[in-house]
Amino acid sequence: MRHAVVIGASMSGLLAAAALSRIAGRVTVLDRDELPEEDVHRRGTAQSRHAHGLLARGLEVMEQLLPGLTAELTARGAFGGDLQADCRWINEGRRLAPAPGGMPGLLVSRLLLEGQIRRRVAGLPGVEVIGESQVFSLTRSGDRVTGVRLVSDETITADLVVDASGRGSHTPAWLAELGFPAPGEERVEIDLTYTTRVFRRRADDLAGDPVVIMAATRAIPRAGVALAMEGDRWIVTIGGYGDAPPSDHEGFVAYAKSLPAPDIHELVASAEPLGEGRHHRTPASVRRRYERLSRFPRGLAVVGDAVCAFNPIYGQGMSVAAVEALRLGEWAARDRPAGELFRSIARVVDGPWDIVVSGDLRLPGVRGRRTPKTRVINAYLERFHRAAEHDVELGRRFLRVANLIDPPRALLRPACLFRVFRGAMGGAGGSRGVGTQRREPEVAGLDQA
């Protein structure tokens, strides 16, 4: 392949470029935003002001695509830990049993992570990352895409065009213009709004634990995450399904008190706030079913949020994009029809999508199709999380799924079923994780949900 063009210089586009650089003579990454050398917020990445999770599988693949990345991020202030021993995972208001789990994690802000990846990708042989270059349309010859036309009317020819432009992808409209069918969409209406504030971090905050991840419950449809990050800071994001957390400090702290467990409230109630609060709203999780199309132009691919935009509270987007970049590189090296790529991407997306959809559909305000299978699985997972409060092995297995190492069906294997139902019958002893007490709905302070 002589030349590949990637639309979008966010995480998905940059990782796609890293994968393609191994097989293409030239890779050009185009983004409509100005791309300064410094790690600063930009218009095209509105969520960069909010907490981002980097899952174990995502970190592993990023290191594979860009060897030495972890060490570079650590040198710039990121730091690691054990995802089970050092993190407070709270499901159904209960802390997953902490213990060394053998899964390394990396705590780093989205700004630093994306900035360092952009610097690495721009330094790869044959790769050019260009800002202030907005793509207007695709060019074609017969049933093959041959390049892109910019808003400036400049045309750039390419053997492959990759749309990594995110939720606002124009590919469905471009396909219609080219005479091809648009993909079907699946949507789960979540009406999620979250607010983020940054706080100064002290060594004894949360007894030294650097992470709290707290899922919403059916009784309390509010969630939150607190992540330590470089510069001795906390980034804390809290949100609700159908309601919006206040952005002022006092309102933020009061809202945090209504979460399913007290950990995040205890942190923000005593920490020093830095800067202003920021809102973000995600109306729906959206999946575009490109793998089901019978016709698709050659020379075009779609990855990242342009294929599937998850509920961001689950922290899966960056890690899924990294795995998709691997699949893109493998496919492009074989020069196969696009359907093969989309089927491969669908297999990557299936597990995370099932996690998100099943998790959200258990909440009463979320609109979507609830099947008997969904109800049974959600009832089982509630029992699973009760047992995992005391069962270290169940906790390890849950984290392998949550971090995209194992598929969701791994939680239904006989060994898990036995431990879950043994725990439900009182066979697992132990006490709750330190620092977490389950909050009952009647004391949650819910006046809006």
Image (tube, grey):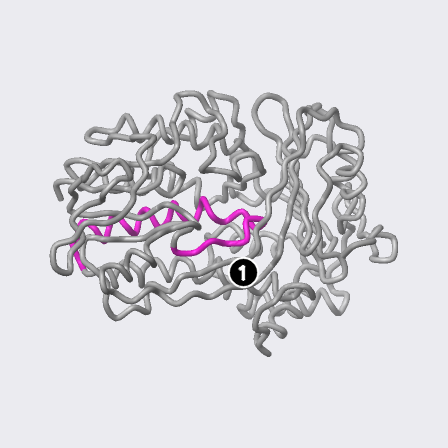
Q: Examine the image and state in which quarter residue 120 appears.
A: top left
Q: Nearer the viewer, residue 368 or 413?
A: 368
- Tell me where residue 294 appears, x and y as whole percent: 25, 71
- Tell me where residue 8 appears, x and y as whole percent: 35, 40
In the rendered image, residue 246 lying in the magenta stretch gets the answer no
Quadrant placement of the N terminus: top left
In the rendered image, residue 327 lying in the magenta stretch gets the answer yes
- What residue lies at 54% left-to-right and 57% top-to-bottom? 284
Element under label 1?
helix
- What residue lies at 68% left-to-right and 27% top-to-bottom? 199
Residue 2 placement, left or right of 297: left
Q: Nearer the viewer, residue 242 or 222?
A: 242
Residue range (magenta): 307-336
- What residue lies at 77% left-to-right and 43% top-to-bottom? 255
Type of the residue with mark 1: Ile
Q: Is the residue 371 above or below the residue 426 in the image?
A: below
Q: Nearer the viewer, residue 38 or 236?
A: 38
Residue 449 placement, left or right of 327: right
Label 1: which residue? 355
Our reading of the magenta stretch's main secondary structure is helix
